[in-house]
Amino acid sequence: MAGPGEYLADVTEGITRVEDLPKPRITKQSRNYKRRPCPSCGRSAYRDRIVTRVLHDLGDLRANRPVDLRVRTSQHYCSHCDIYFNAETDDLALPKAHYTHRVVSMAVRLVVEDGLPYRTASWHLWRDHRVFVPFATIQNWVEAGGKKGGARRGHGVSGRGSGRVQRVHRRR
Ligand SMILES: [Zn+2]
């Protein structure tokens, strides 16, 4: 056991290929329902099939591995509106996002509050949280959440294209 302050070599030091990085630990979540209300008309819609959504989460530091969430999500069909929709996973991540809210919040905080450059924030997330986020992705998150350094808690999102802008949730 290492004592405090003892130097621990980063096990990923010298690794240059992504495939050589430690394999993620998989955690499973379920958002699987027989019926859900249609977001358009409110009628109850039956499950049509189950899809799996994969989200990168903050890593497992004890095991020194990344963590991926596999979310089994029911997809429903509303015959009235003739549309398919998925059960909500908004509590975990934004629609179509590949990372959980926790990862986005952490990344944005490193840049906006701690003032780290994007590349340094990316490295920090890998080294201290075992989640690999390309620095350009962090840049997108920060820019969607407000100007660097100028963002205020809870007021960082500008009005442009509100449906497409990635919002940063700060509920905790
Ligand atoms: Zn409907």
Image: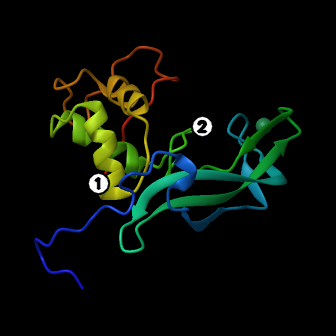
Quadrant containing the C terminus is bottom left
Q: Quadrant of the N terminus?
A: bottom left
> Could you tell which of marks 2 and 1 lies nearer the N-terminus?
2
**Cβ–Cβ below 8 Å for labels 2 and 1?**
no
Amino acid type of the residue that numbered disc 1 sits on in the rendered structure = Arg
Q: Which residue is mark 2?
A: 96
Q: Nearer the viewer, residue 4 or 71?
A: 4
> Is 166 drawn above or below residue 63 in the view shown?
above
Q: Taking 160 as reference, is 108 left or right?
A: left
Which mark identifies residue 172? 1
- 78 or 1: which is nearer to us? 1
Residue in the picture at 15% in, 34% down: 115
User: Whole-Å distance between the Cαs marked 2 and 1?
Assistant: 22 Å
Whether residue 117 can be seen here: yes
* Residue at the spot 54% in from the left edge and 39% down from the top edge: 97
The percent position of residue 167, horizontal first and vertical second, equals 40, 33
Q: Which residue is painted at 46% across and 24% down in the image?
A: 165
Asked which secondary structure carries label 2, the reply is loop
- Look at the picture and state if 157 lies above or below 37: above
User: Which amino acid, by three-letter code, is at mark 2?
Assistant: Lys
Disc 1 under 8 Å from ligand 1? The reply is: no
Viewer-nearest residue: 67 or 82: 67
Residue 70 against residue 17 in the figure, above or below: below
Q: Is residue 25 depicted above or below 106 in this figure?
A: below
**Which residue: 70% across, 34% down?**
40
Q: Which quadrant of the picture is home to ligand 1? A: top right
Q: Is residue 113 left or right of residue 67?
A: left
Looking at the picture, tell me which residue is in the foreground, 90 or 44.
Answer: 90
Q: Position of residue 56 (x, y in %)?
A: 51, 52
Discs 2/1, front: 2
